[in-house]
Image (cartoon, coloured by chain):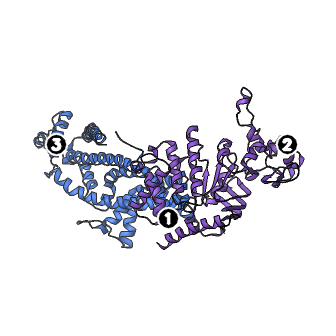
Chain colours: A blue, B purple
Amino acid sequence: MGRYVLRRLLQMIPVFIGTTFLIFVMVHALGDPVNALFGDKAPDPAVAAQIRAQYNLNDPLWLQYVKYMGNLFRWDFGNTFSGQTVTSLLATAYPATLKLTAVAFTIEVVFGISFGLISGLRRGGVADNSVLILTLVVISIPTFVTGYVLQYLVGVKWGILPATAGDPLTLQSLLLPGIVLASVSLAYVARLTRTTVAENSKADYVRTATAKGLPRRRVVINHLLRNSLIPVVTFLGTDLGALMGGALVTERIFNIHGVGFYLYQGIVRQNSNTVVGFVTILVIVFLAANLLVDLLYAVLDPRIRYA
Amino acid sequence: MSSSTSTSSRSTEPRRDTTDSKDAPLLEVRGLHVEFHTREGVAKAVNGVDYSVRAGETLAILGESGSGKSVSAQAVMGILDSPPAKITGGEIVFKGRDLLTLGSEERRKIRGAQMAMVFQDALSSLNPVHTVGMQLGEMYRVHKGLNRKDAKAKAIEMMDRVRIPAAAQRVGDYPHQFSGGMRQRIMIAMALALEPDLIIADEPTTALDVTVQAQVMDLLAELQAEYHMGLILITHDLGVVADVADKIAVMYAGRIVETAPVHELYANPAHPYTRGLLDSIPRLDQKGQELYAIKGLPPNLLRIPPGCAFNPRCPRAQDICRTTVPPLFEVTDDEGVPAPGRASACHFWKETLHD
């Protein structure tokens, strides 16, 4: 197990370098950041040259990347054009996004698995069909539509929950954005759980568990659900990273100053330091979540052993 | 707590009963009908099956796949998937009570504690993600209310009982870490854990190597004698049956077509289907000759042929076989003296007997 973890950690290095380089290249392909900085006005050539020198923009791209990565390892993500350090932005943005993600993830896990279990156990029933139709609707509608509609209905018209999440973030104010962010993943989790539960409920070991005279509850939770969750956990793990990145739309709608919010501004202003910095951290989160899932997999399914 | 003590006292009482009154069978199945409601129609899996087992007795139920032998056993256990399965008639009298009239919670308490089942494929029948110790101990935890530690000790004891080497070290292992024979021993240990009165073994050795088959069968027979249990052995393998069974019921298309004490059935079958089965066993003295096979296929349970279900495949079929369902005739010897325990659902059982 230890060797496996070490190998996986080593594998992360080339993946990390590769992804960050790609992002670096793509951000620079957006156009000239100095021009973007000045908007519609033409920049003063002297000022532009000074900025270019300050941000190493005259170097070839690969050298810029090397310099950037060098700074990164000293925990220096550079500055934004407005002079703030990217690290300070990260420090305000990530806690907010983490809170939002935690709320969304909890909703996704609890409701997704519950709905999936109920509908998988009673396939073809009323509950099953409702879950199928509802999840299909949720999957088909883009997040920004669900977001704005729910914000208007729940937050403004009926006033049940806060319409926006300001500062400081409370659990109550994160509930609505959490639901919006979780909705699509929740639908997938419900459908995935439904399929595996339905499949496993015909398994021989479930029949054995029943033949042992175990109460139905124990058969379902200890035997059926325990096995059915193995593929669901894989999805949840990869989705954890996607939720954090996917918060981009939700955070804009509910005015949460998180990763998505700053990332959006960084992209609009072509601020490469912000974009690359935020995405770099996201990449690390993705990689860590994936490793965690693979390790959890071995815990859930003892037949899998890593060497 | 009170429920667990009542189950334990209940499980010891009737054992005395059965030894006192030797006549009352442990399990009596009468006129059992099971149907499967499918999209294509109603599949009549079991069509009026009667059999009985006494304490200490072994009944073998023989038949091809789809003959209804497993379905009738699952009906007795109460583990049929319903829907689609539905018991449409009959009685299952176990220790004097008709199980079909009991509530689901009462039946659950009987399952595992008073009647238990050993399944065919131990690898798929054991839960892959739990240790064998947990799966064995679960029997004691649920039915007897034992704590984790005591249940584990009991599990090790049972593993010793079925002669799994180094049981104490292996109690934390998972099913896939055992060999096929050892896994089946664990299945047997699980079935025997609460010393039930009846064991139903559904093809317990089919998935095993031939050498291991004999060991597992011997173990099962030995423990059955030790605990004085009734055993229903479901199989399609005539070889397995010969050594351990007391009596045999042959099933075809959801009916019992012949019953007989084991040696009489082998010596002189009274149903053409049984004869066909016996003739299709490879024999050393017929080496080099083509192996006999019953022609045709078992009937589609959605469309069981009228009359005797076996008539399209039967070498002896006459007009009556195509119109009239043969009841189970009592089989008698040449002088007309009834042969105890023998019956055949064939219009021409006499002729078959004399072949």
Mark 2: secondary structure: loop
The alpha-carbon separation of the residues under discs 3 and 2 comes to 94 Å
Discs 3 and 2 lie in a common subunit: no
In whole angstroms, how far apart are the C-alphas of marks 3 and 1?
60 Å
- Return the residue at label 1: B143
Residue A259 in picture, x, y percent from top left = 26, 54
Visible in this render: residue B29? Answer: yes
Q: CA distance from mark 2 to mark 1?
A: 52 Å
Quadrant of residue B9 in the image? bottom right
**Chain bearing mark 3:** A
**Rendered location of residue B73, percent (x, y):** 64, 56
**Which numbered dot is residue B354?**
2
Amino acid at circle 1: His
Using the image, determine if residue B239 lies above or below residue A254. above
The residue where tag 3 is placed is A73
Classify residue B216 by image quadrant: top right
Displayed quadrant of residue A291: top left
Amino acid type indicated by mark 3: Phe
Q: Nearer the viewer, residue A178 or B238?
A: B238
